[in-house]
Image: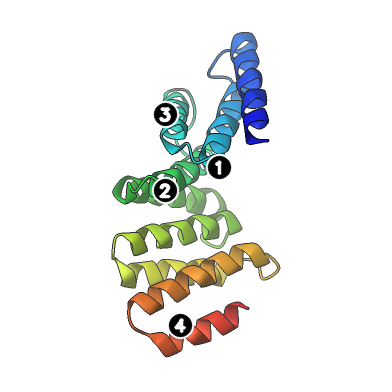
Amino acid sequence: RFADALDATDQAAEMRSAIEGETSEGALVYATDQALVLKTMGRHAEADVIYQRILDLREATGPSDSKELATLLNNMGTNLLLMDRADEAELHLRRAIAIQEAKHGAGHPSTAITLSVLGTVLTAQGKLEVAEAMIRRAIAIMPPADIEMREGAFSGLTSVLLLQGRLEEAATVTEDGL
């Protein structure tokens, strides 16, 4: 099914680029969809090439603080983390957070998602205290009704606490996250 989705996004991106130009919003959205499908399929290097092309185009043609740019940077950060390129992921995610906070404020749910992903990156880098702070901040601003988002953040926080040897606190966080 992912192969079908990839074919469909490839065709849509090519058509939008041919009709509207490769820098049109429609073409960039479909290119982003291509990268997301590739990332989901585990084809991270191919997704990275597309993400980088989109980033270059967005930076050359659009505002440096758009919601679309922040979303792209978040997606790139996640993909880079999956490629074990945590240092690059951190840079993209911090930039996404800065844009999100400027646009929506520090308490917006999209900021929470990116903070949680950044916490995962910082955990991978061994920066456990900073990771814990980011994840706790993310949890504090996540909508209570968004169970899936909160489960991921609580899982990340539990991992950080376990890596720090804080077993009892990790057990409590796990229970709170349930």
Which percent across, then down, holds residue 90? 35, 51
Residue 108 placement: quadrant = bottom right
Q: Please tell me the numbered disc located at residue 170.
A: 4
For mark 3, what is the residue? 49
Whether label 1 touches label 3, CB < 8 Å: no
Mark 4 to mark 2: distance in Å? Answer: 25 Å
Mark 3 to mark 2: distance in Å? Answer: 14 Å
- For the residue labelled by badge 1, is the local secondary structure a helix, a strand or a loop? helix
The amino acid type found where label 4 is placed reads Ala
Nearer-N-terminus badge (2/1): 1
For mark 2, what is the residue? 82
Tell me if residue 76 comes above or below residue 106 in the rendering: above
Mark 4 to mark 3: distance in Å? Answer: 38 Å
Which percent across, then down, holds residue 1? 68, 35
Nearer-N-terminus badge (4/1): 1
- For the residue labelled by badge 2, is the local secondary structure a helix, a strand or a loop? helix
